[in-house]
Amino acid sequence: MKRMKNDRLESQIAQVAEVAGYLWQRGWAERNGGNISVNVTDLLTESEKALPAISESYALPKTMKWLKGNCFLVTGTNRRMRYVASQPMENMAIIRIDNAGDTYEIIADNPVRPTSELPSHLSMHDYLKGQGIDNKVVLHTHPTDLVAMTHYRPFLQPDVLGKLLWSMIPETRVIVPKGLGIVPYELPGSMALADATIQLLDRYDVVMWEKHGALAVGSDVIECFDMIDTLSKSAQIYLQARAMGFEPEGMTEAQSEELRKAFHLC
Ligand code: 13P
Ligand code: ZN
């Protein structure tokens, strides 16, 4: 980092770079697929938050009421995750929302334009903050197995796919206790996609955007990755069973309920 010398921020950047590498290795990040944002406001000093901008100011699609003056580390639009991993600040930027919540500008390190999914990401940060939830991270990626499953209409009914994935291996319900929501197809980068996603965030840890990708929210980027990775593990078990020619039996409702109680899940 040229503009900020800050160990806590450096370690957050290193974590995002680590996860970007995992997304690429998993085959979920073709070309520029996927994006990550982290609220880093609490990691910055007052003088870092007040640094002069290195870009013009850009309008946001709606007022971000709870994010006034907040700063975010965001992956750049059209940037490849494999290069976020190897050269993080050449492919990410730190942006600052203005004090009215209506615009943002880039304050570090290079003038990298944020992801086209910024409306979704900021809407989610804004919504969760407004609910009093200490959410820091929004992670979006394109897991092949999970996206394939959203091409099958019966799986798009509420809780059908989530329950199926929970039933493939006990860990999935433990790691993703609120389960998987389904957002019907909307144009990537649109406010319609952002609004539809927000409606499911109270109820689920991870949502699938139909025929597009997964989105996880949380306080830690590694945890967000782990939730999607665990869902993908369940998807793999299901698909491998189907490839062997049988419909997997799945854990019973009673076994899932026993697990919920034993692990004090919601
Ligand atoms: P960006 O390169 O703008 O982040 O877009 C990638 C993507 O996955 C859109 O949903
Ligand atoms: Zn995408």
Image (cartoon, helix red, strand yellow):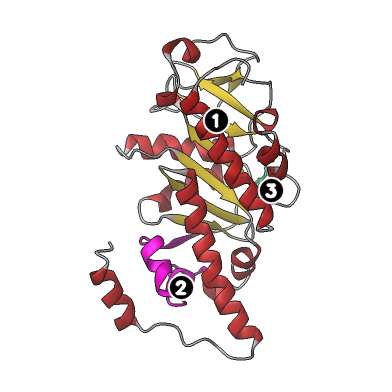
Identify the magenta region.
156-181
Identify the residue position indicated by label 2 in the image.
Answer: 160
Taking the image as shown, residue 198 lies to the left or right of residue 263, namely right
Q: Position of residue 252 (x, y in %)?
A: 36, 84
> Magenta stretch containing residue 159, yes or no?
yes
Taking the image as shown, residue 204 lies to the left or right of residue 207, namely left
Work out which quarter of the rendered image holds the C terminus and state it.
bottom left
Residue ID at (63%, 91%)? 245
Query: Based on the displayed image, in which of its 4 quarters is residue 20 positioned?
Result: top right
Cβ of mark 3 under 8 A from ligand 1: yes
Q: Secondary structure at mark 1?
A: strand
Identify the residue position indicated by label 1 in the image.
Answer: 73
Label 1 amino acid?
Answer: Leu
Alpha carbon distance from label 3 to label 2: 26 Å
Ligand 1's quadrant = top right
Above or below, comparing residue 9 to residue 54 in the picture: below
Query: Based on the displayed image, in which of its 4 quarters is residue 67 positioned?
Result: top left
